[in-house]
């Protein structure tokens, strides 16, 4: 793990790093020392590790909760090269969208392709970040919406170190069996008027989670319109389960 | 309005009162003086103004939020006499339950019967309570689950003084048109495995609310098994909208 830059702003230290091929960012309280809860934060499709929503949420979790937050560029996203296979699947997906088709199956194919690489990457990042003195071996949570949920659910199902998750903005297609292996507490966000995820598909993904402790928060609005108060609610959820 | 008793416990003053035919209880912070937000709290079917869930939630709202909370016995409930018409409708409802029938229509009939009396009663109680120095004319919210939701939605639709509500554990049957007249912020609680309210009926009632600011919280478990953390979430919702 190699750090490439460090800045501090409003009590939050931001460290950019590279782990093998993976570019990432770590946010911690300025002057942090010792172990603390860590949130792995997965970005949405076409976005990257420093998308505005990621940065804002990370700052909130660090300043209000004293958490560490780490984000990485997902495979074929952000600063990373695009593979030929990804380019082909992405082109098919775009063509389907332009043609007004139901692209649920193509989206699931895309997510499965990316998850196969993203899950072991997250596991390596988790191990490396927890070796740092100012992060340490505290409890771990995962936050990810949309594609961040599609890559997060396979991670949570596979990785026992992740003890709680906030996910959502995704339907069940291609994920039912994986979701059934999720048993940790989950807060699931659903947008009632989501133009990309049919409502019944989102409700079915929440239903498919085996977790005894799961809670669904649904709000009016489109895919990108999660209300701001859910950021505080996510932090309280993580504090309840990781604090 | 006539007070019949007053006690204080753990920083909460509880005053029993009678307003005309209506027996009620008012909870305020011990030594309270001046205006504060007021929550009208409606109990469930077969319950009463001092059911354990009502008392526990009232104490939480008073001690953690500085709110005033008032509960009354709904018509034909608690210390109040049962009318012949109520006894007949209740007997039909019980017979349907025993016979294993779908009692949705009978339940809606029962709720409509009670709401016609409960709505003007709540309005009179609200007026009387807000004339007290230690309650005053602050913002008003409504909390009610199950029958408390069935009587609350007509109240909220009719009464502009109620500015936010937490309701739930009820289906849309008989309430769609009334719910469409609700425009204030609503937090709606739904139990994912509710043995009394079909899931799609509960989701349809949330959907029927016109409120631009509405949020659905769904949790696993049966009708009576709302998780304890929702009490804190309800208080934060009221604080956000009435504070």
Image (spheres, coloured by chain):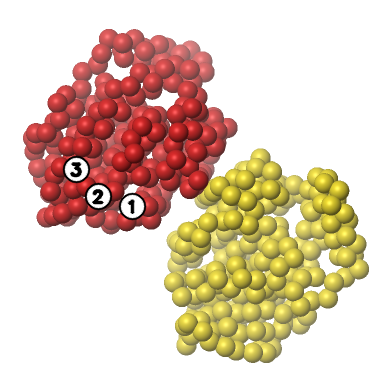
Chain colours: A yellow, B red
Residue B26 appears in view: no
Vertical arrangement, residue A64 with respect to residue A95, above or below:
below
Q: Are marks 1 and 2 in contact (CB under 8 Å)?
A: yes
Task: Name the chain letter of the residue that bears numbered label 3.
Answer: B
Judge by depth and name the residue closer to the eye, A137 or A173. A173
Task: Name the chain letter of the residue that bears numbered label 1.
Answer: B
Residue under label 3 = B130
Residue under label 1 = B242
Q: Residue at x 45, y 67 (%)?
A: A243
Instruction: Return the x and y of residue A16 as percentages of the image width and height.
Output: 65, 84
Q: Residue at x 56, y 62 (%)?
A: A163
Helix, strand or loop for disc 1: helix
Helix, strand or loop for disc 3: helix
Of marks 1 and 2, which one's residue comes earlier in the chain? 2
Distance, label 1 to label 2, CA atoms, is 8 Å
Residue at the extreme front of the image, as rendered: B160
Residue B138's label in the rendered image is 2
Q: Which quarter of the figure is the N terminus of chain A placed in?
A: bottom right
Q: Are marks 1 and 3 in contact (CB under 8 Å)?
A: no
Instruction: Return the x and y of residue A154 as percentages of the image width and height.
Output: 70, 59
Q: Residue at x 48, y 85 (%)?
A: A30
Q: Residue at x 15, y 50 (%)?
A: B134
Task: Name the chain letter of the residue that bears numbered label 2.
Answer: B
Distance, label 3 to label 2, CA atoms, is 8 Å
Judge by depth and name the residue closer to the eye, B174 or A67. B174
């Amino acid at each position: 793990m190699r750090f490439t830059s460090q800045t501090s702003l409003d009590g939050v230290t931001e460290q950019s790093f590279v782990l093998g091929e993976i570019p990432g960012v770590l946010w911690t309280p300025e002057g942090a020392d010792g172990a603390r809860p860590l949130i792995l934060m997965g970005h949405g499709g076409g976005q990257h590790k420093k998308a505005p929503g990621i940065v804002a949420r990370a700052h909130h979790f660090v300043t209000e909760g004293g958490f560490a937050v780490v984000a990485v560029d997902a495979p074929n996203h952000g600063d990373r090269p695009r593979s030929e296979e990804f380019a082909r699947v992405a082109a098919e997906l775009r063509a389907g969208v332009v043609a007004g088709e139901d692209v649920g199956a193509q989206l699931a194919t895309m997510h499965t392709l990316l998850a196969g690489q993203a899950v072991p990457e997250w596991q390596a990042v988790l191990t490396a970040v927890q070796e740092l003195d100012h992060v340490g071996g505290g409890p771990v949570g995962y936050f990810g919406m949309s594609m961040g949920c599609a890559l997060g659910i396979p991670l949570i199902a596979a990785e026992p170190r992740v003890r709680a998750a906030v996910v959502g903005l995704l339907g069940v297609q291609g994920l039912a069996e994986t979701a059934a292996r999720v048993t940790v507490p989950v807060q699931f966000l659903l947008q009632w008027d989501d133009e990309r995820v049919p409502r019944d598909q989102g409700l079915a993904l929440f239903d498919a989670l085996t977790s005894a402790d799961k809670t669904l928060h649904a709000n009016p609005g489109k895919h990108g319109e999660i209300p701001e108060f859910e950021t505080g609610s996510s932090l309280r959820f993580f504090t309840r389960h990781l604090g």
